[in-house]
Image (cartoon, rainbow, N blue to C red):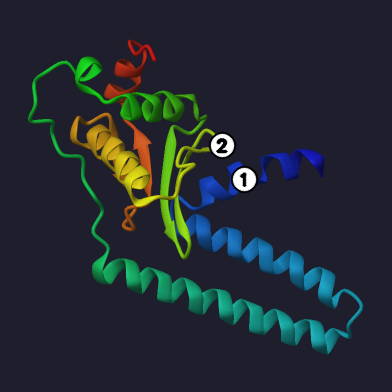
């Protein structure tokens, strides 16, 4: 159980990469909750709860796939137009972000806006420690540099998940901070 709790953030991160992963994670989470809440209930209650949970998961899955089919535009990597050496042309923040991203086991960076702020997270670190607009803009620019140079690529349709490309791994091997 301890190994599961240690690996839980990685499991959730991996599941969040696709609609099917989210749906599978939701199904497992609901099953575990239902087991604990209704373990001592009668058979009729258990069957009723199972049917309701099953219908809910099916409904959620259908809505999720419908939304994805209606307007999800998967961001495609743009070829770099600048032929200069990316190692020398990157800002210090872009270099740090790339180094942290290649140290992440999945090579993933998440950039999430929420009610009170922003998180730019990779390798179990939030790189935005100052929530001022100026600091956030610096890190947004660093991420955009990596995308423009083809060192990272956007995944999904929400503009929140990014992965290091082969070129990114190659450039990171030559970076010094």
Q: Nearer the viewer, residue 7 or 123?
A: 123
Q: What residue is rendered at 82% in x and 75% in y?
A: 37
- Quickly name the residue at label 1: 9
Earlier sequence position, callout 2 versus callout 1: 1
**Residues at badges 2 and 1 in contact (C-beta under 8 Å)?**
yes
All told, the count of numbered labels is 2
- Give SS at disc 1: helix
Quadrant of residue 31 in the image? bottom right
Residue 94 — which label? none
Residue 105 horizontal/vertical position (percent): 52, 29
- The reply, left or right, for residue 47 in relation to residue 143 is right
Residue 2 horizontal/vertical position (percent): 81, 41
- The reply, left or right, for residue 169 in relation to residue 114 is left
Q: Nearer the viewer, residue 44 or 93?
A: 93
Q: Nearer the viewer, residue 138 or 72?
A: 138
Quadrant of residue 150 in the image? top left
Q: What residue is rendered at 62% in x and 45% in y?
A: 9
Q: What residue is rendered at 50% in x and 30% in y?
A: 104
- Quickly name the residue at label 2: 124
Mark-to-mark CA distance, 2 and 1: 9 Å
């Amino acid at each position: 159980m301890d190994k599961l709790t240690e690996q839980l953030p990685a499991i959730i991160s991996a599941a969040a990469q696709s609609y099917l992963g989210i749906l599978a994670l939701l199904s497992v989470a609901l099953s575990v909750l239902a087991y604990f809440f209704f373990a001592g209930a009668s058979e009729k209650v258990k069957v009723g709860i199972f049917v309701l949970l099953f219908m809910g998961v099916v409904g959620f899955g259908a809505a999720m796939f419908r939304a994805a089919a209606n307007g999800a535009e998967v961001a495609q990597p743009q070829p770099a137009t600048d032929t200069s050496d990316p190692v020398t042309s990157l800002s210090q923040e872009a270099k740090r972000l790339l180094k942290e991203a290649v140290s992440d086991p999945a090579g993933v960076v998440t950039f999430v806006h929420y009610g009170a702020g922003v998180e730019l997270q990779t390798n179990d670190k939030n790189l935005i420690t100052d929530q001022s607009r100026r600091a956030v803009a610096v890190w947004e620019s660093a991420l955009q540099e990596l995308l423009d140079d083809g060192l990272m690529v956007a995944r999904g349709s929400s503009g929140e998940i990014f992965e290091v490309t082969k070129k990114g791994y190659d450039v990171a091997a030559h970076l010094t901070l």
